[in-house]
Amino acid sequence: MELAEYGWDAGFAAGFAAFAERGLSPARVIKQSRDLATLATRSGQVSGEVSGRFRHEATCLADYPVVGDWVAIEGGGSDPALIHGLLPRRSAFTRKAAGEVTEAQVVAANVDTVFLVSGLDGDFNLRRIERYLTTAWTSGAEPVIVLNKADLRPDLRDVITEVAGIAPGVPVVVSSARDAGGLEALEPFLLAGKTIAFLGSSGVGKSTMINRLLGEERFQTAAVSDAAAGRGRHTTAGRELVRLPGGALLIDTPGMRELQLWADEEGLDRAFDEIERHASRCRFPDCRHEQEPGCAVRAAVEDGTLDVRRLDSYLKLRRELRFMVLKRDVKTRRQEEKAAGRRFAAQLKEVKKHKPRYQ
Ligand code: GDP
Ligand code: ZN
C-alpha cells in the first residue's frame, strides 16, 4: 500500500526524519478504540498501542494519538505494533472531555477541509454557523460552508449572500443530499489524499451526505425527530477514517460530528475578521467594545457598517471562551498544587530518612 493514499506527503516525511533515523516506520491512525488503534502502514493494516515510555511521557489526553494522526511505530506482525511517537498535527479538532473540569480531548487530527453543514430548513441559523467557523479556524482545517436541503429553499441567492456576509473568504456551497447529483458542489474539495470531515448539528443531513459519498448505506439516517431524540444513529461502528471512491479520505467519528465549542481567541478573531479590523481603530488597545469611549467597533454598528447581531454574537462567544479558559486554568492550578504536594511529601520522606538516629 502507498502511504500517499492515506495522505502522506513531503511535509509529513520531513517531520518524520528523526523517527526514521531510529528505525521506526510511519503509520496513520484510522481507528481508535480505548487502548488499541488500527493503523494504515506500508504493509497494510495493523493494530497498535502506545509504548510504555510514550504513556509515561504523555502529560495530558491531547498527547495521545487519535484518528487521523501520523505515528511512528515499531513492529506490527502478529503482535500489536508499538507506537513510539506522534507527528506534529496540522490540524486538530478538540472538544471538552467529559467531566467537571475542562480538559481538551482531541477527536480528529490532520483534517484538511471541514464541511460545516447547515440545513436550509426551519433550523437555519447564522449564529450557529459563526460558532462552527470559530471552531473550524481554531482547528487549523480549512472550512467550507455547506448549505444542505437546498430543495427546501426557493430563495437561495439571498441566503448565500447572507452567509457570505458572515464568512468572508470562506467558500459557500449548496447541496441537496437526497437528490442524485445533489452533492456536485462538494466535489472540488474531495481531492485524492486530502482528509475531509463533516461538522454540523444533528439532522442537517451529514449521514445522508456521507452515505452518498461512500456509495453505500454505512450509517443509518434518521428522521429529524429521531435525530432530536438522540437515538443511536450508527448501525455499524464502522471504520473512522475511510477512503472515498475518488481517493479523498473521510474522517467520521461519533465525537467529530457535534463538537461543543472548543476554540481559542485566534479562531474567534479569524471568524470575526472585520470586527478585528474595526478594533484596530479603537482608542484603547485593550478595548472590549462594550462601554469604552472611542470604540471604533461600536461606531461601526452606529453607522451601519457592522451588523449589531454580528457584534453580539462575537461578544457572546468571547465570553464563553474566556469562561472556558478560566476553568482550564483552575484545573492546571489544581494539578500544580497536587504536584507540589507530592514533591513536598517526597522531601519530607527524605528528611525523615536522614534524621539523626540519636534523637
Ligand atoms: P445528520 O443528523 O446530520 O446525520 O442528518 P441525516 O443525514 O440523518 O438527515 C436528517 C434528515 O434530513 C433525514 O430525514 C434526511 O433524509 C433528511 N435530509 C438530508 N439531506 C436532505 C436534503 O438535502 N433535502 C431534504 N429535503 N432532506 C434531507
Ligand atoms: Zn472597541
Image (cartoon, rainbow, N blue to C red):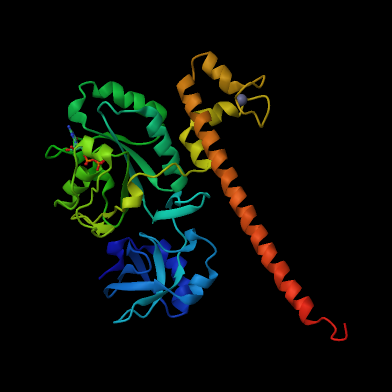
Of the 4 image quadrants, the one containing the N terminus is bottom left
Image coords of residue 81 (percent x, y): 36, 77
* 68 sits left or right of 14 in the view: left
**Against 163, is 192 above or below?**
below
Which residue appears at 31% of the width and 51% of the height? 254
59 vs 71, nearest the viewer: 59
**Against 346, is 305 above or below?**
above
**Against 270, is 75 above or below?**
below
209 vs 348, nearest the viewer: 348
Q: Residue furthest front?
A: 359
Of the 4 image quadrants, the one containing the C terminus is bottom right
Image coords of residue 240 (percent x, y): 28, 58
Q: Quadrant of residue 222?
A: top left
Which residue appears at 16% of the width and 46% of the height? 212
Q: Quadrant of residue 84?
A: bottom left
Q: Quadrant of ligand 2?
A: top right
Q: Residue furthest bottom?
A: 358
Which residue appears at 63% of the width and 21% of the height? 291
Image coords of residue 232 (percent x, y): 24, 48
232 vs 132, nearest the viewer: 232
Which residue appears at 57% of the width and 39% of the height? 322
